[in-house]
C-alpha cells in the first residue's frame, strides 16, 4: 500500500507541470472589421495590428463598407469578425443584445463639404451630385437620417453616390461631384485633404429652424 501511494504521488508530481498546458490558451488570432482607405478607422486598425503583433496576437483586418455592415457581421454567429469600431447611433443594446461595448474612443462629426455655397435654411440639395457613403456605411445611414430630417436630402432630383471618403475627397477636389458627406474624425486623411483644399468649402448647417426677429407689440 505504501509503495502504491508513493507511485501515485510520483505520477502526480510528474504530471502536475503539464496541467497549465492542458488549459485552453487565449485566442491568438482575431479578426477586426476595417473601413475603406482614407478613413481614420482604417488607420487605427493598422495601428492596432502593429501593437497587438508585439504581444504575439495576429490581428486580421477584414474589409467592410462601414459600421452598418460591421454590426451585421458581428451579430452573425457564422462570421469571423470579433470586433469593430462602431459610431454611436448605429445600433442599440435592445437591437444587439449579444454585442458588448468596451468604451468610447473619440468624436466623429458628420462632415459636409461642397464646391460652392449651399442653402443655409434647410433647403434640399436639388440637382446636385452628392456622395453620402457606400451601402452599409455609417456615413450613408446617418446622412439619410439626420440630413433627411433637416430636409436637405432630396432623393428625387439629387444624384446620391456611394463613394468612400477618399474617393469623395478626390472627386470633390477635381469637380466631379458637388457635395461630399461622410462621418469621420478630425484626423481622417480624407477630412484633412478637403480642409486644405482651396476649392472646397466646409458647410455649416444649423440644427434648428431660426426663430423670427423679436419685436415689441
Image (spheres, rainbow, N blue to C red):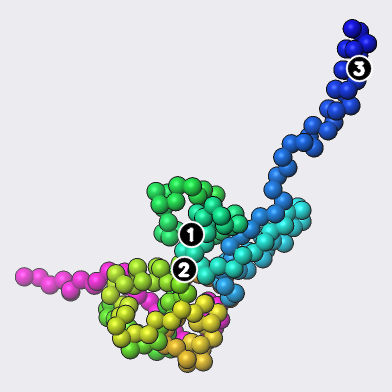
Report the quarter where the C terminus lies. bottom left
> Is residue 165 shown above or below 89?
below
Where is residue 80? Give x, y as percent: 60, 57
Q: Quadrant of residue 119?
A: bottom left
Quick check: 32 left or right of 163?
right
Establish if 23 lies above or below 178: above
Q: Earlier in the sequence, mark 2 or mark 3?
A: 3
Callout 1 secondary element? helix
- Residue 136 has which mark? 2
Q: Earlier in the sequence, mark 1 or mark 2?
A: 1
Q: Position of residue 18 (x, y in %)?
A: 83, 33
**Tags 1 and 2 touching, CB below 8 Å:** yes
Mark number displayed over residue 72: 1
The magenta segment: 190-217
Q: Quadrant of the N terminus?
A: top right
Nearer to the camera, 118 or 79: 79
Q: Which residue is mark 3?
A: 7
Q: Residue at x 72, y 51 (%)?
A: 28
Amino acid at each position: 500500500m505504501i509503495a502504491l501511494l508513493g507511485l501515485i504521488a510520483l505520477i502526480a508530481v510528474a504530471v502536475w507541470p503539464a496541467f497549465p498546458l492542458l488549459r485552453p490558451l487565449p485566442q491568438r488570432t482575431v479578426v477586426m472589421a476595417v473601413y475603406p482607405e482614407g478613413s481614420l478607422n482604417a488607420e487605427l486598425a493598422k495601428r492596432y495590428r502593429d501593437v497587438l503583433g508585439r504581444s504575439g496576437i495576429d490581428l486580421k483586418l477584414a474589409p467592410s463598407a462601414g459600421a452598418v455592415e460591421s454590426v451585421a457581421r458581428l451579430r452573425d454567429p457564422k462570421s469571423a469578425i470579433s470586433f469593430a469600431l462602431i459610431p454611436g447611433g448605429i445600433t442599440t443594446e435592445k437591437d444587439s443584445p449579444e454585442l458588448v461595448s468596451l468604451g468610447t474612443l473619440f468624436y466623429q462629426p458628420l462632415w459636409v463639404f461642397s464646391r460652392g455655397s449651399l442653402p443655409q435654411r434647410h433647403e434640399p440639395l436639388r440637382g446636385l451630385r452628392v456622395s453620402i457613403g457606400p451601402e452599409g456605411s455609417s456615413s450613408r445611414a446617418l446622412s439619410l437620417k439626420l440630413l433627411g430630417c433637416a430636409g436637405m436630402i432630396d432623393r428625387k432630383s439629387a444624384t446620391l453616390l456611394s463613394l468612400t471618403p477618399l474617393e469623395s475627397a478626390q472627386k470633390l477636389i477635381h469637380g466631379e461631384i458637388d457635395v461630399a458627406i461622410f462621418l469621420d474624425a478630425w484626423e481622417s486623411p480624407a477630412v484633412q485633404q478637403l480642409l486644405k483644399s482651396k476649392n472646397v468649402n466646409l458647410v455649416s448647417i444649423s440644427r434648428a429652424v431660426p426663430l423670427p426677429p423679436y419685436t415689441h407689440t
